[in-house]
Image: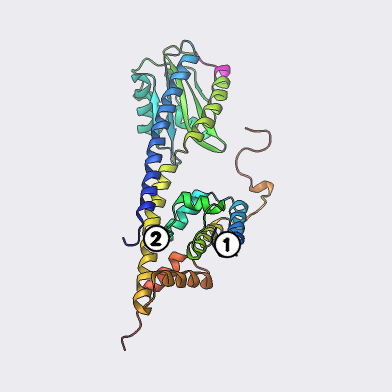
């Protein structure tokens, strides 16, 4: 653990966001990597599990990566019957 | 490319290697599947399995004998045939007698000289995704009816779920594309960082912090914020 008292909270909320938006660690890492993130995928995994500490800039890059992925996902939307694709009721 | 840590590059290459390995696993699984279909249906001279991508292009295939391969190659070259129909419609296709069946005229005339009369093709569907199709052939007409079709589609369902777990057929392509994109994006961001460092005489970390700040304030992505910065005119020399 690092000395930054806010790190556990920042990490916890990142984890919650990943779960809520259904983002995998691999997906997050690839985006973070493309944003010049310097921690490896296993390190990111370890950070999320609270096993290692990351510098502020890396944590913020992870947060930004997560937010960028969320922004690209289609917003949650409950479909109506006429918006359903595929076979209708009873059909296979 | 500056600022690319070796461990990340290694990890990325390892990921690609992993995918190539997985592709091999798919080929092996498909070949085992073709063999299993042939052995579980007595009297079947040949069986074949093809996996297709979203556009109907064949990505992996396996056949128990050369005849099946010949029939298949003709289908994918002509873009018509029972397997393509099964894949596209998601339904089992039964050909009672190939000589009397006119649904695929080009394919029919191409394979007319081959010793094949009955064909059943079942789609491989996992969830909502059509992964491909498999088929069995017989040299005699009228070998397969509705019950064979039902049995095959049950088998197909299990096989498709299994194959989908081994590897989504589109993943390697998507992965390679996203890898290329992420390397380009790293380059853009690092270039923008370099410009900030030069213009303001700050450290790499300070420059990256500023870019993150710009992205947050303007509601753009980090790579967009970097592109904006890089395309802006440099401050006039004083």
Q: Quadrant of residue B140 in the image?
A: top left
Residue B106 in view of the camera: no
How crowded pointer 2 is (Cα within 10 Å; few <14, some 14-19, many 20+) is rated as many
Q: How far across and how far down the image is residue B126, in percent?
A: 54, 34
Residue at 45% x, 32% y is B84
Q: In which quarter of the image is residue A13?
A: bottom right
Q: Residue at x 35, y 28 (%)?
A: B73
B232 or B156, nearer to the observer: B232
Discs 2 and 1 lie in a common subunit? no
Label 2: state its secondary structure. Answer: helix
For the record, the magenta segment spans: B143-148
Q: Any mark on residue A7, and which?
A: 1
Q: x and y percent of residue A62 in the render? A: 51, 59
Residue density around tag 1, few if under 14, some if 14–19, many if 20 or more, within 10 Å: some
Residue at (55, 53) in percent of width and height: A48
Residue at image point 48% right, 69% down: B212
Q: Nearer the viewer, residue B142 or B204?
A: B204
Depth check: give the residue in front, B185 or B44.
B185
Chain of the residue on which disc 1 is drawn: A
Compared to residue B216, the image places residue B127 above or below, namely above
Query: Which quadrant of the figure contains the C terminus of chain B?
Result: bottom left
Which residue lies under the disc numbered 2?
B185
In the image, farthest residue toward the bottom? B238
User: In which quarter of the view is residue A90 placed?
Assistant: top right
Q: Which of marks 2 and 1 is in front?
A: 1
- Is residue B84 shown in magenta? no
The mark found on residue B78 in the picture is: none
Q: Position of residue B22 (x, y in %)?
A: 41, 36
Q: How is the image coloured?
A: rainbow
């Amino acid at each position: 653990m690092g000395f930054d008292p806010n790190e556990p909270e920042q990490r916890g909320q990142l984890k919650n966001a990943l779960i809520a938006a259904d983002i995998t660690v691999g997906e997050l890492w690839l985006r973070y990597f493309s944003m010049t993130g310097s921690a490896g995928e296993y390190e990111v995994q370890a950070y999320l599990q609270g096993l290692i500490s990351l510098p502020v800039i890396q944590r913020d890059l992870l947060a930004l990566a997560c937010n960028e992925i969320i922004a690209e996902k289609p917003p949650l939307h409950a479909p109506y019957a006429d918006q359903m694709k595929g076979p209708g009721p009873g059909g296979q | 490319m500056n600022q690319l840590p070796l461990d990340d590059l290694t990890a990325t290459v390892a990921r690609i290697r992993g995918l190539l390995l997985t592709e091999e696993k798919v080929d092996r699984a498909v070949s085992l599947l073709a063999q299993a279909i042939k052995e579980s249906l007595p009297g079947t001279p040949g069986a074949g399995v093809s996996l297709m991508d979203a556009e109907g292009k064949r990505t992996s295939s396996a056949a128990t004998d050369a005849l099946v391969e010949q029939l298949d190659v003709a289908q994918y070259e002509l873009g018509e045939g029972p397997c393509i129909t099964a894949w596209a419609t998601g339904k089992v296709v039964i050909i009672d007698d190939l000589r009397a069946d006119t649904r695929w005229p080009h394919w029919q005339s191409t394979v007319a000289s081959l010793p094949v009369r009955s064909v059943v093709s079942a789609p491989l569907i996992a969830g909502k995704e059509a992964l491909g199709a498999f088929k069995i052939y017989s040299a005699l007409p009228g070998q397969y009816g509705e019950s064979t079709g039902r049995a095959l589609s049950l088998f197909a369902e299990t096989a498709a779920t299994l194959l989908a777990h081994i590897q989504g057929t589109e993943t390697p392509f998507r992965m390679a594309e996203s890898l290329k994109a992420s390397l380009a994006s790293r380059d853009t961001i690092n270039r923008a960082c370099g410009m900030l460092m030069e213009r303001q005489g700050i450290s790499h970390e300070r420059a990256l912090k500023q870019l993150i700040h710009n992205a947050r304030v303007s509601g753009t992505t980090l790579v967009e914020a970097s592109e904006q910065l890089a395309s802006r005119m440099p401050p006039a020399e004083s």
